[in-house]
Structures are given as C-alpha cells and as structure tokens.
Image (cartoon, coloured by chain):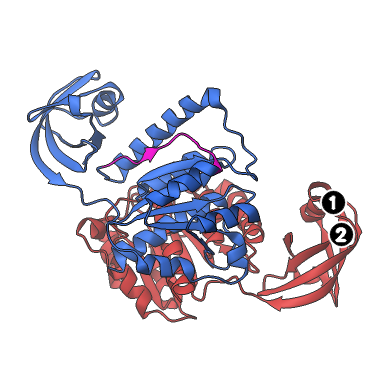
Chain colours: A red, B blue
Amino acid sequence: MQRYFIKPEQKTGVHITITGDDASHIARVMRMAPGDKVVCSDNSGMSMVCELIDVTPQQAECKVLETYEDRSSLPVSVCIAQGLPKGDKLDMIVQKGTELGASSFFPFSSSRAIVKWDEKKGAKKIERLGKIAKEAAEQAHRSVVPAVHSPGSFQDLLNMAEQYTIKIAAYEESAKSSEHSLFAAALSNASPGDSILCAVGPEGGLSEREAAALESHGFLLCGLGPRILRTETASLYMLSAISYHFELMG
Amino acid sequence: MQRYFIKPEQKTGVHITITGDDASHIARVMRMAPGDKVVCSDNSGMSMVCELIDVTPQQAECKVLETYEDRSSLPVSVCIAQGLPKGDKLDMIVQKGTELGASSFFPFSSSRAIVKWDEKKGAKKIERLGKIAKEAAEQAHRSVVPAVHSPGSFQDLLNMAEQYTIKIAAYEESAKSSEHSLFAAALSNASPGDSILCAVGPEGGLSEREAAALESHGFLLCGLGPRILRTETASLYMLSAISYHFELMG
C-alpha cells in the first residue's frame, strides 16, 4: 500500500486531508480513486490505514480505518555523523541510510573535507535532503522520517557525543592495524533503546588529531574489515551491520 | 599506497611494466616519479610492493620489493545474483559490492524486470562494469578483482545454484511475514571457505512462482529486516552483514 507522511494539522479526528505533491501523486501517478487505500504516518511512530473518499490532483480526502504502532524502526536509534562528502554522495547516504533505519543525519566539516558547505545554498540543500529522507521513508515503509540536520563543525560533533550511549568512529588506520572486533564488541554491549552515534570522515578521512579528539570524547575508533571502504559505503555498512545485529540475529 | 592490477604478461621476474590508463594515472594524476612506491596485484591473490624505476605517461617500469598474500578477501566467496535493475544501478551495485567483498556478480532477467538487456550494447556494458570493478578493487585495497558475468536467464540462476554451499534469496514477502532470522541462521551455519549465492530480485521483486522455484532449488527465502529495501540496497545489506558476521564478529 502506498504511504504518505502527514503533519498533525492535516488530521481532524478520523479525517485526513492530503495536499500538495502527495495529492498529485495519488491522483496522477498512482491514479487512485475513492475506495482505494493508502497508509498515512504522522511521524510520531503511528501509522494509519486510510480509505480515500475524494480524490483531486490538488487534494485527497480520506478516513482512518485502522491505526497501528511502528514496527519499522531499529531497536536502537542511530545518528549518522557524516564528514561532508563530494558531489551528490550526501543524497545517496540520506536515501540509503533512511532505508537502512537511521534516526538522523548530521553532516560535519572537518580538516580533510574537500567540500565547503555553501551557507547560501545550504538551506535549500537541507530542504532537498529532507525530501529525499521523506520519500525514502515512505518507500521503505517506515513510519518516522529521519531528521537531516544542518551541517556543523567538528567541535559540534564532539559536543553532541555526550547525548549518546555509544559513540563509534570508522577509522581507516584501525582497519589497517587489523582491529576488526571493536565495532562488534560495541554492538554486543548495546541494548535496545540505546542511542548510537556513528561518525565517518570525508573522502580524505579523519586526521590523527581528530581521531584523538574523538577518542577523548568517548568514541571507539573502529575498523570495518580489511577492505578500505569509501566514505558513503562506510555509513551504509555500519547501518546494515546494526540492523543485522539487532533485527536479524535477534 | 596506490594499487594497480597487472596481467601475468606484464611481469618478468621481479620486473613489472605498467602501460595504458594505469601508466597515465601514475604519471599524470598521481605525479609519481622514480623511487615512489606502488602496489601491484596479479589478481591471483598475491600483492607486490614495487618501486618505480622509470615513469612516462605511456609506460611505468618498476621492480618488486616485497610480495605478500591476500588479506582483503571475505573468508566466504559471495556471488551477487542481481535481477536487472533500472538506470545505472548496476554500476553502483558492482562498485559498492566490490568494496564490500563480493567475489562475482551475475545479473539475471526475470518476469518482473522492467529492464531488458540490450545484446548489442551488452558486451560494452559488461566491459564497463569490469572496469568499475577493477577500479573499486584498487581503491578498496583488494588483491582480486571480482568477475562480472554477462546476464543470464532466471533458469541460468537456478542451474548455478548447485555449485554453491549456501543459497539465499532476499524476498520481500518473507520480510512482511516478520521472518527475520533465516539469513542470520544461514550465516551461522556457514564456515570459512564456503560459497554463498545471494539472489536479489529487480525493482518489481520476485514473483511467487520464482520464489517457489528458488526454494525448490535450495534457496532460503529471507527477509532483511522490517523495512523494505530497494533492490540495490538489498545486495549491499547482504554483503555488509556477511562481512560483519565473518570479519568483525570473529
């Protein structure tokens, strides 16, 4: 069933009004008609099976038939702190990371980042990333859209750390020194409900100084196996491994 | 250290001749000079640290200083059988799948595939995918380039199955029915040296009939957690989980 995220003001009692792009999608792309069903999620973790009552490309009216709780979230909340990557890699990380269950994304600048965040274009870019996250969440049948935060500094990343139960940084030097078990050990010590902050450097990696600063703020410097992963692959690896550990190994 | 794959004929004793794009890369992109070091891999699992003796954009000569065995392969060999996806997703699957340790890729056509393989353009496309795999293997510090096979039919996929110790198919219906432990159970039963065939349907998924045929050929139909993954994400999830299971959990 097709899924749409709604804002609280779109819902009055058992009645939901869908507008904008989503209404157009229902009418024009899905060609749905009264009687057809959709799932609406209010981004609080509740999803509702709804029946369409009236459909125009501008507005779709529907009524709630059934409400159910979120079954699609990772048992741990994961924030992906991503060193600003080149090109459109951030789009891909947000799209795939949303499918893989991330709770939020925090892009950060660091000493070896090639990309500088353009403050002028920044707001628009964050808006676009939010849209990518929303669409990926709908597609993945998630009932919560992960938050995409505006980029911060490396110091901001350090300051965030204390809010998280577990802090992990992917560090190539750890991979080279054959340190391959710290990440798995960290997940083994985690419990459902814990929050995990996963930091990944940009293309150029984290500097030794940054790695030391992360370590002193409680981050574990972890290798992710013997192959050197691209920055965008490292994020997705960590999320896949977290899902495998908590959702599949059970 | 920068890595390059060489063919057997490029090596004579301790002397290696690098030509073509790689020579140009050494001279023009990396701006290396005699005395600088590179790693050459012969795609048999052996890697060699080499010192450059002579560098031109057409040809680089180097001598082998040290030879070491492959430390970058997954302990199990994994073939990704991928239902033909739309657009340039196959490029992405081959690139990221190579980083994540796949041994080979086998694209296959199936009933719900939207894409038809163009036999005329096919050979060129396979050549390009082979190049993507080679570059990704160099970047990931792998000493073997995974094979990219020409696409086959669904029947070819079924025929391949008996060559593999473990056969897994990602199946959305299994995910919906909350079957989340079969994949982890299959990996727990695998041993280093085993071969794993991972099948993923195209965007439209596998039909019920195809799922039944796979099952009768020894495939386990597995869910990959409670979120619905895009076809290209499913391949990368399986490889990440296999790496996590065998390389990080130890």
Q: Which residue is mark 2?
A: A60
Residue B118 falls left or right of residue B143: right
* Dot 2 crowding, Cα within 10 Å, few <14, some 14–19, many 20+: many
Mark seen at residue A27: 1
- Residue A43 on the magenta segment: no
Q: Quadrant of the C terminus of chain B?
A: bottom left
Nearest the eye: B244 or B188: B188
Chain under numbered label 2: A
Q: Is residue A82 visible?
A: no
Nearest the eye: A194 or B89: B89
Chain under numbered label 1: A
Q: Amino acid at mark 1?
A: Ala
Nearest the eye: B207 or B48: B207
**What segment is highlighted magenta in the picture?**
B144-154
Residue visible at 78% across and 70% down in the picture? A49
- Specify which label sits upstream in the sequence, 1 or 2: 1
- Please say if A216 is above or below A24: below
Secondary structure state at the residue bearing disc 1: helix
Q: Is residue B218 visible?
A: yes
Secondary structure state at the residue bearing disc 2: strand
CB atoms at circles 1 and 2 under 8 Å apart? Answer: yes
